[in-house]
Image: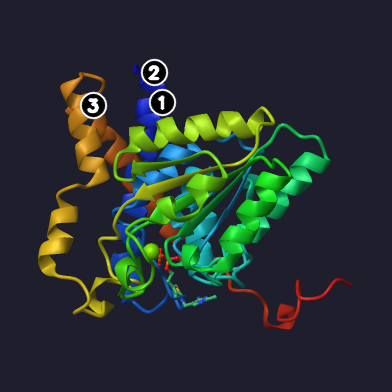
Amino acid sequence: MTYPKKVLHKLLFDMMLIRRVQLAIESRYMDNEMKTPVHLCIGQEAVAAGVCAHLKKNDYISSNHRGHGHYLAKGGNLKALIAELYGRETGCSKGRGGSMHLVDTGAGHYGSSSIVGGGIPIGTGIGMAIKMQRQKRVSTVFFGDGAADEGVLYESINFAVLKKLPVIFILENNQYSVCSHISARQTGNSIFHALPAKMLPSKIVDGNDALAVYDASGKAVERARTGKGPSFIECRTYRIRGHAGCASQDVSGYRTAEEISQWGKRCPITSFQKMLLKKKMITENEIHKTEKKINSRIQDAFDYARQAAPPAPETLSANLFRE
Ligand SMILES: Cc1ncc(C[n+]2csc(CCOP(=O)(O)OP(=O)(O)O)c2C)c(N)n1
Ligand SMILES: [Mg+2]
């Protein structure tokens, strides 16, 4: 398949942006100015970039605790993301949510949740709303293999299939739920083979290959948008960093250095850049320029966030109750 240069460059840009933002957060985390827990998605960038490349501004996503990539790829505001991590009033959740509770309805992001599996029924309900309002939009739900341990996924898929909802279920299978490997939690070797494959159009893809994700999700989005109902995509990937916090805070012992290093060699960004260079779809100079542009945007976002004001104490109970 051939891809427009614009699409390829967008995929690369989004992946590089997500990676650079994650690295910047990690490098500043120990300054102790960000009080929020963080869950970095280094190694998983191709999933967010590949899926969101098909989404329009007024499409919806819901996400999980490891959700910075989803927010950025969906067109979320970088300054609002960093300000949120710094607990500022100008953060996307007005500084009340922190890293795990990003919300930006203007960007079509209907929330990430620290409740594992929590975003799945929300995204399914959004699909119901789309259908009832006869909109041409789609609802995409990002969740992990840990969330797929939970019954709510199967209830939600059942409902989405029954009502033919425009929902795309994106499982980011990075094999771990905190420090518990999938083989210790699920029978068989694949969530895909367990149930979804029997209930709705489903596909397993290499989650470190942006184009594989792009192709599969393109079909799923098209299906949903044309009223044919939900789809399920399992993206096999790996989180290179620890479950939470920054590198120096990782609990070790549950994965081997060899395993991490093997997956490190399958970096979604390096391989994508190599492919583009080989096909002469980009030059080293263009990559370098993109890197510079991203770094400068990140610098601006951190400067903005650090000088922004925290919420005023008297607004502590604001947004909790409907007046
Ligand atoms: C309902 C619920 N159960 C347990 C937890 C504790 N917890 C936080 S993150 C996590 C792992 C989730 O794994 P997965 O869904 O695969 O996402 P990943 O962290 O791998 O991106 C768990 C069990 C929680 N936050 N919510
Ligand atoms: Mg996981």
Check disc 1 and report the residue beneath it.
Answer: 7
Instruction: Check disc 1 and report its element: helix, strand or loop.
Output: helix
Quarter of the displayed picture in which ligand 2 can be seen: bottom left
Image coordinates for residue 63, horizontal then vertical, percent: 54, 57
Q: Which amino acid does label 3 sit on?
A: Leu
Q: How far apart are marks 1 and 2 (CA)?
A: 5 Å
Report whether 92 appears left or right of 125.
Answer: left
Q: Which amino acid does label 2 sit on?
A: Pro
Image coordinates for residue 312, horizontal then vertical, percent: 67, 77
Q: Mark 2–mark 3 contact, CB under 8 Å?
A: no
Inspect this view and state whether residue 17 appears.
no
Q: Is residue 166 above or below residue 280?
A: below
Instruction: Check disc 3 and report its element: helix, strand or loop.
Output: helix
Q: Which of 196 and 271 is in front in this view?
A: 196
Image coordinates for residue 93, horizontal then vertical, percent: 62, 64
Q: Which amino acid does label 1 sit on?
A: Val
Crowd class of label 2 (few under 14; some 14 to 19; many from 20; radius 10 Å): few
Quadrant of the image occupied by residue 117: bottom right
Crowd class of label 1 (few under 14; some 14 to 19; many from 20; radius 10 Å): some
**Which is more N-terminal, label 3 or label 2?**
2
Quadrant of the image occupied by residue 55: top right
Check disc 2 and report the residue beneath it.
Answer: 4
Crowd class of label 3 (few under 14; some 14 to 19; many from 20; radius 10 Å): some
Inspect this view and state whether residue 13 appears.
yes
Instruction: Check disc 2 and report its element: helix, strand or loop.
Output: loop
- Does the Cβ of the disc 3 residue fall within 8 Å of ligand 1? no
* Residue at 20% from the left image edge and 19% from the top image edge: 279
Quadrant in which the C terminus appears: bottom right
Check disc 3 and report the residue beneath it.
Answer: 276
